[in-house]
Image (tube, rainbow, N blue to C red):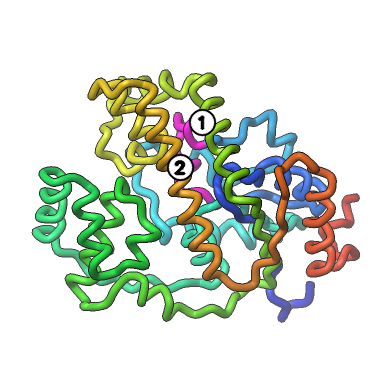
């Protein structure tokens, strides 16, 4: 890589349950990658089953970053993710490896790939408290509906349970008169990196079936016990992390008496909706080479399709293959 060349960055994204993890490991081994988790929940320690976090055994020796780096009550934001990636990417290149972001949190990944600038709109604590009281008294859906009136694009991207980010989107409009979605659309779309951007997709109903099977597997693997332990350790249900899919619904079962079958059905419904929002976000991104992974069962064909895209973008005589 010459001194004036852009550093290379490999990215694999796709909706939840599409099959990113297994493919990413084989890609990382083939191209000497270190993986940066592009997920807003896997940073939290003790939140393993509900986030479908990769296990040390599944990593197969591939180095991973931004997994298990925070306690559930520590703040995590797109700006913090950006800062970490700005440190990690040159460090990984310095070791002669290829940085490889893998995940499904579109805004976080896009913010790194195109160096989004997040201007500080300031804060209005009284306004925040007022919006929180609306959520507390009328429910998070009422607050989300309020956002949908002024910024439907942000409302489409944010889950009603994500009260903190919904309030922040409302606050930005309150303080600036500008919507969060408009601010994002004005962002620079030139990348400081030589990008190889790959997206995984599959038939929507197949994806929904996989989501439901994954959630059944999470329950069997001990998700209820994981959430109970977090609550017993004093992590409040009001934390952003505890509002995540799987944690909110099971906490309702444990603390509010919501029958387990209804909690599980609610989790499946909300996860299907989340996947739909992920796909909607990805559709507005550019530079993505899409791979339809079918039903996910033909792993070798899917791996070959992804490998060919990378080899075409980053020729195989690069230093990343020097170890193979």
Q: Position of residue 181 (x, y in %)?
A: 36, 71
What residue occupies the far front of the structure in this picture? Answer: 205
Q: Is residue 100 visible?
A: yes
SS state under label 2: helix
Q: Which residue is mark 1?
A: 215
Residue 34 is left or right of residue 316, and the answer is: left
The image shows residue 176 at horizontal and vertical percentages of 22, 77
Q: Secondary structure at mark 1?
A: helix
What residue is drawn where x is 55% and y is 58%?
85
Residue 244 as seen in the image, left or right of residue 175: right
Instruction: Tell me the residue at 56%/50% (across/down).
Output: 15
On the question of residue 94 being in view, the answer is no
Q: Residue at x 30, y 30 (%)?
A: 235
Inspect the magenta stretch and tell me whether residue 97 lies in it.
Answer: no
Q: Callout 2 environment at 10 Å: few (<14), some (14 to 19), or many (20+)?
A: many
Residue 145 position in % (x across, y down):
23, 58
Q: Earlier in the sequence, mark 1 or mark 2?
A: 1
Question: Pointers 1 and 2 in contact (CB under 8 A)?
Answer: yes
User: Percent from the top left, x then y, of residue 61?
Assistant: 73, 36
Up-down relation of residue 17 to residue 255 (above or below) = below
Q: Alpha carbon of mark 1 to alpha carbon of mark 2: how far?
A: 9 Å
Identify the image quadrant of the N terminus.
bottom right
Q: Specify whether 62 is left or right of 175.
A: right
Query: Where is mark 2, residue-wise?
Result: 271
What's the magenta region?
39-51
């Amino acid at each position: 890589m010459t001194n004036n060349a852009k550093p290379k960055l490999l990215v694999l994204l796709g909706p939840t349950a599409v099959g990113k993890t297994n493919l990413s490991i084989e890609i990382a081994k083939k191209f000497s990658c270190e993986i940066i988790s592009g997920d807003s929940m896997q940073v939290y320690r003790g939140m393993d089953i509900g986030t479908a976090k990769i296990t040390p055994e599944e990593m197969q020796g591939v180095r991973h970053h931004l997994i298990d780096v925070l306690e559930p009550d520590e703040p995590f934001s797109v700006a913090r993710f950006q800062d970490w990636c700005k440190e990690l990417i040159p460090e990984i290149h310095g070791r002669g490896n290829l940085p490889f972001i893998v995940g499904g949190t579109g805004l976080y990944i896009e913010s790194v790939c195109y160096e989004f600038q997040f201007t500080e709109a300031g804060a209005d604590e009284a306004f925040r408290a007022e919006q929180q009281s609306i959520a507390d008294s009328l429910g998070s859906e009422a607050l989300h509906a309020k956002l949908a009136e002024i910024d439907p694009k942000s409302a489409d991207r944010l889950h009603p349970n994500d009260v903190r980010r919904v309030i922040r989107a409302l606050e930005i409009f309150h303080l600036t008169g500008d919507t969060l979605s408009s601010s994002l659309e004005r962002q620079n779309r030139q990348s400081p990196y030589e990008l190889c951007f790959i997206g995984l997709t599959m038939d929507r109903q197949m994806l929904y079936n996989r989501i439901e099977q994954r959630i059944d597997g999470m329950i069997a693997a001990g998700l209820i016990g994981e959430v109970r332990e977090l609550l017993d350790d004093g992590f409040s249900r009001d934390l952003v992390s505890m509002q995540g899919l799987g944690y909110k619904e099971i906490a309702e079962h444990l603390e509010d008496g919501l029958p387990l079958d209804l909690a599980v059905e609610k989790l499946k419904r909300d996860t299907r909706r989340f996947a739909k929002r992920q796909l909607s976000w990805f559709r507005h991104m550019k530079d993505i080479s899409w791979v339809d992974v079918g039903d996910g069962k033909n792993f070798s064909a899917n791996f070959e399709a992804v490998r060919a895209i990378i080899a075409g973008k980053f020729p195989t005589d690069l230093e990343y293959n020097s170890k193979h």
